[in-house]
Image: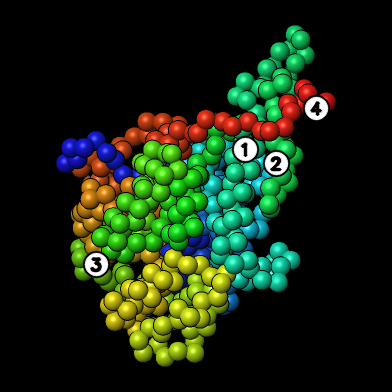
Amino acid sequence: MNDTGRQMHLAVFAQGLGAAQSVWRSPRTEPDKVHTLGHWARVAQVAEEGKLDAVFIADALNLSTSIGSDATERPDPIAVLSALSAVTSRIGLVGTSSTTYNQPFTVARQFATLDHLSGGRAGWNIVTTAIAAAAGNYGSAELPEHEARYERAEEFVEVVTRLWDGWQEDAIVLDREAGVYADLARIRRLDHEGGHFTVRGPLTIPRPPQGWPLLVQAGSSPTGMNLAARFADMVFTTQFDIKDARAFVDRMRELVTAKGRDPFAVAVMPGVTPIVGRTVQEARDLARELGDLVRPEATLAFMQQMFGGIDFTVYDLDEPFPDVRDLLPPHASVSRPRLFMAMAEEEGLTLRQVAQRIGLSTGHRSIVGTPDQIADELATWFTEEAADGFNLMPADLPRGLEDFVEEVVPRLQDRGLFRKEYTGSTLREHLGAPAPEPVHGNGPSMAESK
């Protein structure tokens, strides 16, 4: 039983038909429905039935070459989440949006609108885009280097949050007798001029119901962690070892404290792929069945993107995983390639073995076992403060999520580790993450600038 009163957070990280490569080949999935609202609605509604904090939609700004053998297309998260807001009532709706290939005004407007439509359930997953192929879709010859992307991201997020703060909460007056819809003195321009952006403001929609939609940061590099420490309410990370995960949490708490925030203000939620069976053998059989569907070319194409364009097809699959540290380009993601290289070196893995692990869970930790075993593993990480919760990445959707909600969630609830009912109506209330106090723009109010 849980004697501390602390409860874990759970979100489902929804990637089309699931986290496993080539899972569309499994009879457990319905690939002809992945582009329909019915598919996404089922995922969100199952998650809501399980009282999960949020459904979290991934994104990619380029079409992978693995599309020939894998279902790697990505719909626009904002469009999907807007539709889901109408078929759900409590679960949070987190969407991914890039700070490298967007403008702050657009992103602020989109997520403010989603927050209003959903009654305060929106969240923004902040990414800088580490896939070089995306650059050509936005008129660029190449992806900016890692540090440059995060420098832009810091200013980007600051502008977005200040735009959300541009309307005071009582700006809408609705005085029918006097004919006053809004008090112009309570709506202020931003007049931001920075190194990357010049933004006048104000936003075209009132302050979001949550103040700020929940902010999520996905990344574990030093620059990514610093961005999270300043702004984020949740961090999505990749962790395999409980000792390393605890060290990551400790470091995150230190960085958050250094920014003048409560050290527990940021929920650290690593990704995990649970594969549930009624028996250990059934779970192992399912994992093997899904793993056998993976086409090596699909996983190697995914790895090529993850490692900044390195072509792994030139290496022997059954030789030790190659040391490609010196081949990583400046624009490449930092944290995940280093994590996989360290894991391969420590465990003596071949390229094939690393690819198999990545293929089953998109490169995150997988737990294969009975409902009790999976609940035990999650509980251990949580109680030992190696995680504040988990981003669930079912190998197949929606079946893998249904298995987890039906079998694992009740066991976590019985231990007092997870809610039995929602106690709040907004995503921030689910996470226990109050919005920061508003900081209004530097510019004049609309009354002053008429």
Front-most of 83 and 122?
A: 122
Whether tag 2 and tag 3 are in contact, CB under 8 A, the answer is no
| Mark positioned earlier in the residue sequence (3 or 4) | 3
Query: CA gap, disc 2 to disc 3?
Result: 58 Å
Q: CA distance from mark 3 to mark 4?
A: 68 Å
Q: CA distance from mark 3 to mark 1?
A: 51 Å
At x 50%, y 33%, the residue is 436
The secondary element bearing badge 2 is classed as strand
- Relative horizontal placement of residue 384, taking residue 312 as reference (left or right): left
Q: Give x and y (percent) for residue 430.
A: 40, 37
Residue bearing the label numbered 4: 449
Q: For this rendering, which residue is in front, 260 or 154? A: 260
Q: Exactly how many numbered labels are in the figure? A: 4
The circle drawn on residue 192 is: 2
Would you name the residue on which mark 1 appears? 162
Q: Is residue 374 above or below residue 327?
A: above
- Mark 1 lies on a secondary structure that is helix
Q: Which mark is residue 282?
A: 3
Q: In the image, what residue type sits under mark 4? A: Ser
The furthest residue to the front? 258
Q: Is residue 250 above or below residue 442?
A: below
* Residue 445 place in picture, x, y as percent: 73, 26
- Which mark's residue is nearer the viewer, 3 or 1? 1
Task: Measuring from the top left, give residue 166's x and y in whole percent.
Answer: 65, 32
Cα separation between marks 4 and 1: 18 Å
Amino acid type, label 1: Arg
**Is 11 on the left or on the right of 135, as rendered?**
left
Under mark 2, the amino acid is His
| Residue at the far right in the pictured view | 450
